[in-house]
Structure formats: C-alpha cells, structure tokens
Amino acid sequence: MLSRSRPQDHYHGPTLDLVLEFNGVWGEKQTVAGVREDNSGGNIIFVSPGARLNFGRGYSIFASPLFPMAQDMNGFEHEVDFRLIFGASVVH
C-alpha cells in the first residue's frame, strides 16, 4: 500500500521565504457628474521586497514594503512614497 503525505504532516519548525516582486497600479481618469476629472488616475510601478514566515500546518504571515520605481500621475495628484502590505494566511 502506498502512503502519500502532505507537506503540513511533517512539520520541522518555521521557515522563512524571501521574495522580490514587481507590481503595478493603473488608474483611469474618473468621471464625476459627466465631467472628466483631470486630476485623477495615473500609473505606478513598484519594486516589492518581502518575507513570508511559515509556521507549518498551513499557517503563515507575510509583509512586503512597496517602493515606487516610476510614477506617472495625472494632474495635481500626490505621488506615493511607499506602501506596505501585510497579512496572514491559513491553508487546510
């Protein structure tokens, strides 16, 4: 008889995964009451180094700061200095 085990069945302590992502945000100009708003929309490209700590049994937490590499904002919009994404996940 063959036995298949799942990765979460053999827990050997927490592990750390390091990641590097490139993310983009695109926003279209808004229309308010039929009038196109020139000071809205734009594009941002981020570089996002991050880390995920896996606790086994399907539990993990993660965090990633996003630093803008390029921004093309429309009109008088504020540019982004950085963003932060963090969270937790459970997989069963």
Image (cartoon, grey):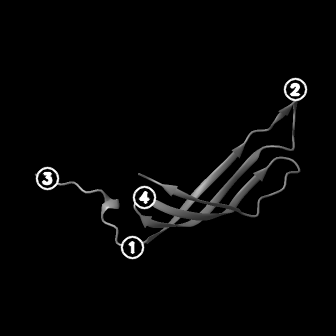
The span from disc 2 to disc 4 (Cα, nearest Å) is 49 Å
What mark, if any, has residue 91 been given in the picture?
Answer: none
Task: Give the side of residue 42 with respect to residue 75, left or right.
Answer: left
Residue type indicated by callout 4: Gly
Q: What residue would you read off at disc 2?
A: 34
| Image position of 17 with respect to 78: above or below | below
Residue type indicated by callout 3: Leu
What mark, if any, has residue 13 been given in the picture?
Answer: 1
Count neighbours of disc 1 (C-alpha within 10 A) and say few if under 14, some if 14 to 19, many if 20 or more: few
Q: Residue furthest top?
A: 34
In this view, the mark in front (3 or 2): 3
Q: Nearer the viewer, residue 23 or 4?
A: 4
Task: Give the side of residue 81 with respect to residue 39, left or right.
Answer: left
Residue type indicated by callout 2: Gly
Coordinates of residue 26 in the picture (x, y in percent) = 69, 45
Task: Give the side of residue 34 with respect to residue 19, left or right.
Answer: right
Residue type indicated by callout 1: Gly
Q: Which residue is drawn at 87% across and 40% down?
A: 38
Could you tell which of marks 2 and 4 lies nearer the N-terminus? 2
The span from disc 3 to disc 1 (Cα, nearest Å) is 26 Å
Could you tell which of marks 4 and 1 lies nearer the N-terminus? 1
Q: Residue at x 70, y 53 (%)?
A: 44
The span from disc 1 to disc 2 (Cα, nearest Å) is 58 Å
Q: Quadrant of residue 13?
A: bottom left
Q: What residue would you read off at disc 3?
A: 2
Count neighbours of disc 3 (C-alpha within 10 A) and say few if under 14, some if 14 to 19, many if 20 or more: few
In this view, the mark in front (2 or 4): 4
Could you tell which of marks 3 and 2 lies nearer the N-terminus? 3
Q: What residue would you read off at disc 4?
A: 58
Secondary structure at badge 3 equals loop
| Image position of 34 with respect to 11: above or below | above
Coordinates of residue 25 in the picture (x, y in percent) = 67, 49
